[in-house]
Image: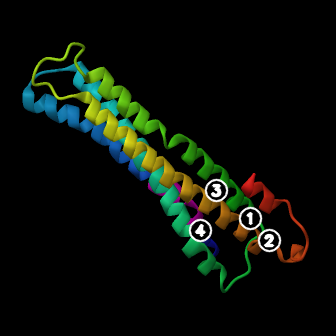
Amino acid sequence: LRLARHRAIVLGHRIAIVGMSLWLIAGIAFPIGIHAYAQKFMPEVYAKFILSMFACGIISCCLPFLATTWLTIRVYFPLLLANSTPEPNEQKKLMNLSWYAGIYFAVSPVAPLIAVLLILLSSPRIPTPGDPDPRLAIGGLIISSILGFGAAYLVWQRIRGDLAALAVVTRPPDQIGTTSQSTDSFLA
């Protein structure tokens, strides 16, 4: 059970690493494929693909971390505590998880800003008739960014609340019934 609880605590990090890695690999593989197909080297294509895939990687890193961590802390971790006594170091691991959730939450709005910057940099300086209007893409990105950031905030708040509750449960047996600053550290 101790090993399963450890896996539950680090599952969000592992999901984030997989998401970011796959998008970065795609950011390198797609321009190489285009280069092989078109037989033409276009450095601006490489730069745009790598930057756009990096922006997508941030999204697939931060938001899945928050969602997975919320699921594991809300559902899996309490079930794994049902038949065993928690380890003394698990409270420290959960406090660290609270800190990491704050970092992922703080980084989550970066990707849409990078995407808006890429749209602004790739749009023509002087629009010609028939060119798509970048304002539609920028407006869509801004609206989806606000919605995504709002969802990330709600999930982050629930993670903090669930971790604060788990701080009491994972308290070592010799400290049950005593006051602790650990719950306050989750909400600080």
| Disc 3 + disc 1, Cβ < 8 Å | no
Amino acid found under the numbered disc labelled 2:
Arg
Q: Nearer the viewer, mark 1 or mark 4?
A: 4
- Residue beneath label 3, please? 97
Q: Mark 2: few, some, or many residues within 10 Å (few <14, many ≥20)? A: many
Q: Is residue 166 left or right of residue 172?
A: left
- Magenta-highlighted residues: 6-15
The disc, 4 or 2, on the residue closer to the chain's N-terminal end is 4
In reply to whether residue 68 is colored magenta, the answer given is no
Above/below status of 59 relative to 11: above
Residue on which disc 2 sits:
171
Question: In the drawing, does residue 53 fall left or right of residue 171?
Answer: left
Q: Earlier in the sequence, mark 2 or mark 3?
A: 3
Q: Mark 3 and mark 1: span between their CA atoms?
A: 10 Å
Single out the residue that lies furthest toward the top: 126
- Per the image, label 3 sits on a secondary structure element best described as helix
Q: Position of residue 127 (x, y in %)?
A: 18, 17
